Image (spheres, grey):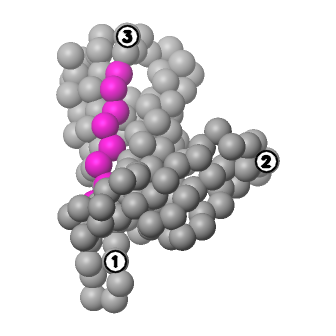
C-alpha cells in the first residue's frame, strides 16, 4: 500500500470551537446545532462528515465510470449524517442519496455498488456505521 495524500486539521474548543487545516484552506467556526441545544453559529462535525463523504463518493463514482468506460453524463450525491444515542455513548447514522444522469436504473445501481466498494469513506465505515444508499437514475 502507498499513501497518496495526508493532511492534518486542528480543533480547539471541540464542538464550540474552531477547526483549521494545516494549509489554512479549511478554517471554520464550529458550534452545536440548535437541535442539540447550541446556538448554531458555525458548522458541526456531522455536516463536515456529510460533505466529505458525499464528495468522496461522487469522486469514486467518477473513477469507476472512467475505468469501466461507463457514459455517466452527470451525478449528484447528497450526504446525510445523523448523531444517535446508543447503549454507551453515541453513533453515526449515514444515508447517501445518489442521482445519475445518462444511465438506466440498473446501470446506475451497479455503478453505485462498485463505487461503494472503492470509496475510502465507505471502506472506513463498513462494518462500523450503517450506510443507506438510494439511487435514482434520470
Q: In this orientation, which residue lies closer to the viewer: 51 or 111?
A: 51
Whole-number angstrom distance, CA of label 2 to CA of label 3: 31 Å
Relative to residue 23, is residue 135 depicted above or below?
above
Identify the residue at horizontal 40%, vertical 52% (top origin). 42
Mark 1 highlights which residue? Answer: 90
Tell us which disc is closer to us: 1 or 2. 1
Residue 13 in view in this figure:
yes
Mark 3 highlights which residue? Answer: 73
For the residues bearing labels 1 and 3, Cβ distance under 8 angstroms? no
In percent of width and height, residue 6 lies at 73, 49
For the residues bearing labels 1 and 2, Cβ distance under 8 angstroms? no
Tell us which disc is closer to us: 1 or 3. 1
Secondary structure beneath disc 3? loop
In percent of width and height, residue 68 lies at 51, 21
Q: Residue furthest bottom?
A: 88
Whole-number angstrom distance, CA of label 1 to CA of label 3: 39 Å
Mark 2 highlights which residue? Answer: 2
Secondary structure beneath disc 1? strand
Q: In this orientation, which residue lies closer to the viewer: 36 or 95?
A: 36
Identify the residue at horizontal 50%, vertical 39% (top origin). 56
Instruction: Read off the magenta span.
Output: 75-82
Relative to residue 110, is residue 10 depicted above or below?
below
Q: In this orientation, which residue lies closer to the viewer: 95 or 33?
A: 33
Amino acid at each position: 500500500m502507498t499513501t497518496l495524500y495526508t493532511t492534518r486539521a486542528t480543533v480547539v474548543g471541540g464542538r464550540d470551537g474552531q477547526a483549521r487545516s494545516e494549509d489554512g484552506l479549511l478554517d471554520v467556526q464550529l458550534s452545536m446545532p440548535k437541535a442539540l441545544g447550541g446556538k448554531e453559529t458555525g458548522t458541526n462535525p456531522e455536516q463536515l462528515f456529510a460533505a466529505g463523504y458525499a464528495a468522496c463518493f461522487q469522486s469514486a463514482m467518477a473513477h469507476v465510470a472512467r475505468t469501466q468506460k461507463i457514459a455517466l453524463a452527470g451525478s449528484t450525491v447528497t450526504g446525510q449524517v445523523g448523531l444517535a444515542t446508543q447503549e454507551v455513548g453515541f453513533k453515526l447514522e449515514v444515508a447517501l442519496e445518489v442521482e445519475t444522469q445518462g444511465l438506466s436504473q440498473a446501470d446506475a445501481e451497479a455503478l453505485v455498488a462498485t463505487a461503494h466498494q472503492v470509496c475510502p469513506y465507505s471502506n472506513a465505515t463498513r462494518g462500523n456505521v450503517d450506510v443507506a444508499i438510494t439511487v435514482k437514475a434520470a
